[in-house]
Image (tube, grey):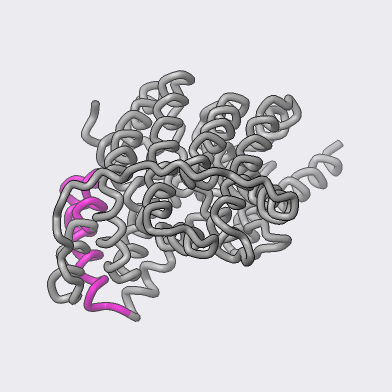
Amino acid sequence: MRPSMISAALVAALVGYGSTIALVLAAAQAVGANAAQTASWVAAVCFGKAIGSLLLSTWKKVPVVLAWSTPGAALIAASTGVNIHEAVGAFILAGALIAITGALPPINRAVSSIPSGIASGMLAGVLLPFCIAVATHAVNDWQLVLPLIAVFLLVRLVNPLFAVLAALGVGLAVAFTWGGVPAPQFRFDPTPLVFIMPEFSPAVLIGLGVPLYFVTMASQNLPGFAVLRAKGYHPPVTAALGVTGIGSAIAALFGSHTFNMAAITAAICLGDDVHPDKTKRWQVGIAYAGVWIMLGLFGPLIIASIIAIPKSIIATVAGLALIAPLMGATALAFEQADTRFAAATTFIVTASGIAAFGIGAAFWGLVSGLAVYGLDWLKRR
């Protein structure tokens, strides 16, 4: 396996984990999960998406990268009056609904019909705020951030593949030295999976389970499929929804909320620098799965370390890692003249970060772009 694949998988997993683990922990706290149940939640979702990524990548020979549902975690964290057993029942329902959706042909046709320019515009809009955040943190927290940027730029001149990893290493060193973060005590303590008996409360199923399904589909799965399509792959919609839906329902018994197609972290694993031959790029899914297995096993240590690291460092590493994918997505978005205006619309709406009805900007960007594309298509007819 090429070192570039391992590097991309490691960066994607660490960025995905580090940038949103606090939100997952907040979700667990909101539903009253105790320490053991919270540890089980994190381990189960790590193992679930590791197995799913490995299975789909090797089965379909497409670089499928899975992530936990970040908007789903936000939805759960905002919930009140729900206990962990009722939440598990809602998680099972959401997973089952995703799997059922995968069996419906209209979903396949809807995803396949999205023009690549619009998909690329959506991806560029998703990535832009993360890249802009690097400049913001460079001003507001320059003592911690500028060394990361300097190392990234210097290593990039020698070997672009390891520039982000070098920045991450420097970020950790900075955080645990003059950043004032106490070094964690190293000990291997595999996180046990704790079975949590589900309770199927109608009010919670409707109030949490159904919205969790919708935000996962609209804000994660559809953009995730669009990212694959923008990179020239035919997304395995039916298989992916089946695997993630059934897998989420099973992992829910150990506390996990839904996991799904990745969009932002997937962009790190789909570039030409990962492997020049796109037909062999699926192997990154194997490395990605291995990293997530380790993240699940070393969950307690990693959680304590990442939570202690200043957010500016995590955000800077994420933004630096996404500059190259942003350049590629922007170029593809405006390549075709007939979809250029629709792609621009998608890009602007997505980058705005708006949210309506609990659904994030990526979905509304796609809707806006497709609407404009439809009007242009009618005019051409």
Relative side of 308 to 170, left or right: right
Q: Is residue 297 above or below residue 206?
A: above
Q: Residue at x 55, y 29 (%)?
A: 240
Relative side of 202 to 119, left or right: right
Res 122 visible: no
Task: Count up the numbered dots.
Answer: 0
Q: Is residue 20 above or below residue 137?
A: above
Magenta range is: 141-167
Relative side of 34 to 125, left or right: left
Q: Quadrant of residue 268?
A: top left
Q: Quadrant of residue 270?
A: top left
Q: Is residue 135 above or below residue 370?
A: below
Query: Foreground: 68 or 140?
Result: 68
Image x and y of residue 341, in percent: 68, 51
What quarter of the picture does the N terminus occupy? top left
Query: Foreground: 119 or 314?
Result: 314
Image x and y of residue 57, in percent: 43, 25
Relative side of 167 to 9, left or right: left
Q: Is residue 213 above or below residue 284?
A: below
Q: Residue at x 35, y 53 (%)?
A: 15
How would you classify the magenta stretch by its main secondary structure?
A: helix
